[in-house]
């Protein structure tokens, strides 16, 4: 790759007066490769925003559960000022408990959303790991797009198709998050399909337009029949059209398991082992288009 090292871990500030939620958010952010900084104190959070580079801020609107004042909006204001002053700043994921926000508070949040500063507004009552990780990854994708748009070295990103069976969707979130942060990689995966699109047509099109196909394997997925096998067959057909020795299909082992017999001739990446992700990047590196 032109840039051989991956981007530094994104720094996620967590502001919530509930220690349990701080712990949950930090664990979920760490699971997808980000670096969390957690506090329950508004003043401390304001100092962190002022003195450290923060990429994403998860902010509880109502820091005092016994108050109906949305004190978290004070940190919104500080972050908005950073955007105005520098042209960039942390993206905000707003979180609210069972305290109802006032009409005025909701109008302010809506204004920040229209400016693109607030990327998600989640309710603790329906919050789970998947929703928070999706919100963090959506904010990370905005950062990646901004980084790519400011990249003026003239090289073209590597188009990578990441495929996992339905049983492995949760297991690949961390990998997907890390690949999304690589400046030189344009990542595509099945969840990007829009309602109403023909999935078979779009996946075949994505395969043919991709430079590399990452096929994720687990003990469960290698035993699956049906659609996963059709996707793999299409990928193998396309691989046969590539020049001899070209890297197109890379098997990704998410855990200790066998890989499909049709891929036995290819060296897999053991993602579950230490250094597995670095090996994957080294394999992708030579394919970056200058």
Image (cartoon, rainbow, N blue to C red):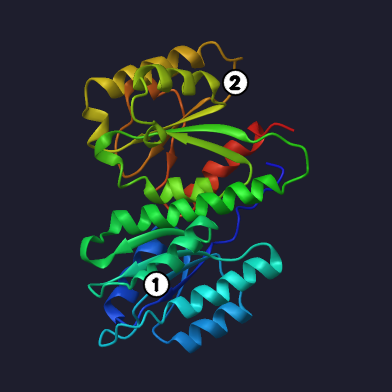
Residue at 70 percent of width and 67 percent of height: 86
Residue 107 on image: x %, y %: 42, 66
Q: CA distance from mark 2 to mark 1?
A: 59 Å
Residue 252 on image: x %, y %: 41, 37
- Vertical arrangement, residue 8 with respect to residue 98, above or below: above
Residue at 60 percent of width and 53 percent of height: 6
Residue 186 on image: x %, y %: 57, 37
Which residue is more in the foreground, 122 or 164? Answer: 122
* Quarter of the picture holding the N terminus: top right
- Vertical arrangement, residue 167 with respect to residue 107, above or below: above
Residue at 63 percent of width and 39 percent of height: 285
Regarding residue 11, the answer to whether it shows in the image is: yes
- Vertical arrangement, residue 102 with respect to residue 3, above or below: below
The numbered disc on residue 263 is none
> Which of pointers 2 and 1 lies earlier in the amino acid sequence?
1
Residue 69 on image: x %, y %: 35, 83
Which residue is more in the foreground, 189 or 243? Answer: 189
Judged left or right of residue 177, residue 130 is left
Quadrant in the rendering for residue 9: bottom right
Circle 2: element type? loop
Quadrant in the rendering for residue 14: bottom left
* Quarter of the picture holding the C terminus: top right
Front tag of 2 and 1: 1
Judged left or right of residue 229, residue 234 is right
Mark 2 nearby-residue class (10 Å; few <14, some 14–19, many ≥20): few
Residue at 54 percent of width and 21 percent of height: 209
The numbered disc on residue 245 is 2
**Residue picked out by circle 1:** 105
Circle 1: element type? helix
């Amino acid at each position: 790759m032109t840039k051989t090292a991956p981007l530094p871990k994104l720094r996620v500030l967590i502001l919530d007066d509930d220690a349990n939620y701080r712990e949950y958010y930090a664990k979920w952010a760490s699971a997808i490769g980000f670096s969390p900084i957690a506090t329950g104190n508004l003043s401390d959070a304001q100092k962190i925003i002022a003195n450290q580079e923060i990429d994403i801020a998860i902010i509880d609107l109502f820091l005092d559960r016994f108050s109906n004042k949305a004190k978290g909006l004070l940190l919104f204001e500080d972050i908005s000022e950073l955007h105005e002053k520098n042209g960039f700043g942390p993206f905000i994921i707003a979180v609210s408990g069972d305290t109802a926000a006032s009409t005025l508070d909701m109008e302010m949040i809506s204004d920040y959303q229209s400016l693109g500063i607030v990327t998600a507004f989640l309710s603790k009552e329906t919050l789970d790991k998947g929703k928070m990780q999706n919100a963090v990854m959506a904010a990370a994708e905005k950062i990646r797009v901004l980084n790519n748009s400011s990249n003026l070295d003239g090289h073209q990103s590597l188009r990578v198709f990441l495929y996992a069976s339905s049983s492995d969707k949760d297991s690949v979130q961390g990998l997907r998050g890390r690949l999304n942060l690589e400046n030189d990689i344009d990542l595509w995966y099945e969840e990007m399909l829009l309602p109403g699109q023909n999935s078979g047509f779009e996946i075949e099109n994505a395969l043919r337009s991709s430079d590399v196909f990452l096929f994720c394997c687990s003990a469960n997925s290698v035993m699956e029949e049906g659609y996963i096998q059709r996707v793999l067959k299409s990928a193998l057909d396309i691989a046969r059209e590539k020049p001899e020795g070209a890297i197109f299909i890379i098997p990704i082992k998410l855990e200790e398991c066998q890989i499909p017999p049709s891929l036995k001739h290819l060296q897999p990446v053991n993602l579950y082992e230490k250094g597995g992700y670095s090996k994957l990047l080294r394999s992708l590196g030579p394919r970056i288009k200058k």
